[in-house]
Amino acid sequence: MNLIIEKTIDFVKSELSDAEGGHDWFHIERVWKNTKLIAKTEKVNLEVAELAALLHDIADSKFHDGDESIGPKKARQFLDSICINQETIDHVVAIIENVSFKGGNWDRTHSSLELDVVQDADRLDAIGAIGIARTFNYGGFKNRAIYDPSIEPNLNMTKEEYKKSTAPTINHFYEKLLLLKDLMNTETGKAIAEQRHQYMEQFLDQFYAEWNGEK
């Protein structure tokens, strides 16, 4: 591991030492590992991809009153402090600004293979067994209902509605998690997502059967 990555890991661990369980250092570490896995089959600038993966949630807007500028600003300040070249910094920050699922009809303002890889890596951590665990952890953190049959998922939310939603946790499967499989960018990401998506569908079948007293 090179010194730049080591310094970045130390910075992220320090910054996220008190983070919510679904957006803590271990989330970052999984996304970083996913990034390196996907990058094996893609011709990317690995340093850019790794730095973006490590810094992508350094200040998640969900925990900063929806302010999406804090994370990119904090990442830029850190990278400046360890004397990374400006071209790399600009690329990493552009990835951070575009990596998240925001709901609504939102389009990326930056395109690169490195963004494709990091975005897939982040989305993989939002689905499958880990995704289920993170979703319920965040729902509990926000004191949301697990499920309310009277509240239908909203599949036509604007970006602002998505950010402000207080819907039951099960609704989040339909409003985000089950959509991610078809939004993957890379062939490796698509293959991994397919299996994780099936696992979530099986979970939901079991959940509803238990909820309705059928199993």
Image (cartoon, rainbow, N blue to C red):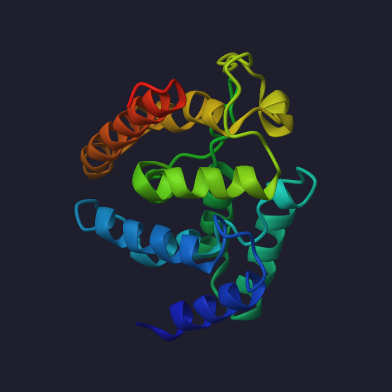
Tell me: residue 178, above or below residue 92: above
Q: Nearer the viewer, residue 206 or 136?
A: 206
The image shows a total of numbered marks equal to 0
Q: Nearer the viewer, residue 152 or 98?
A: 152
Q: Position of residue 38 (x, y in %)?
A: 27, 53
Name the quarter where the N terminus is drawn: bottom left
* Residue located 68% across and 37% down the image: 144
Residue 152 in view, yes or no: yes
In the rendered image, the residue lying farthest to the bottom is 3
Q: Quadrant of residue 158?
A: top right
Q: Quadrant of residue 127?
A: top left
Tell me: residue 88, above or below residue 140: below
Relative to residue 39, is residue 172 drawn left or right? right
Q: Position of residue 184 (x, y in %)?
A: 34, 35
* Residue located 63% across and 78% down the image: 14
* Residue located 71% across and 24% down the image: 161
* Residue located 28% across and 43% down the image: 189
Q: Position of residue 36 (x, y in %)?
A: 30, 62
Residue 99 in view, yes or no: no
Q: Nearer the viewer, residue 50 or 113?
A: 50
Q: Position of residue 13 (x, y in %)?
A: 57, 76
Relative to residue 169, is residue 197 drawn left or right? left
Q: Nearer the viewer, residue 87 or 176?
A: 176
Tell me: residue 186, above or below residue 141: above
Name the quarter where the C terminus is drawn: top left
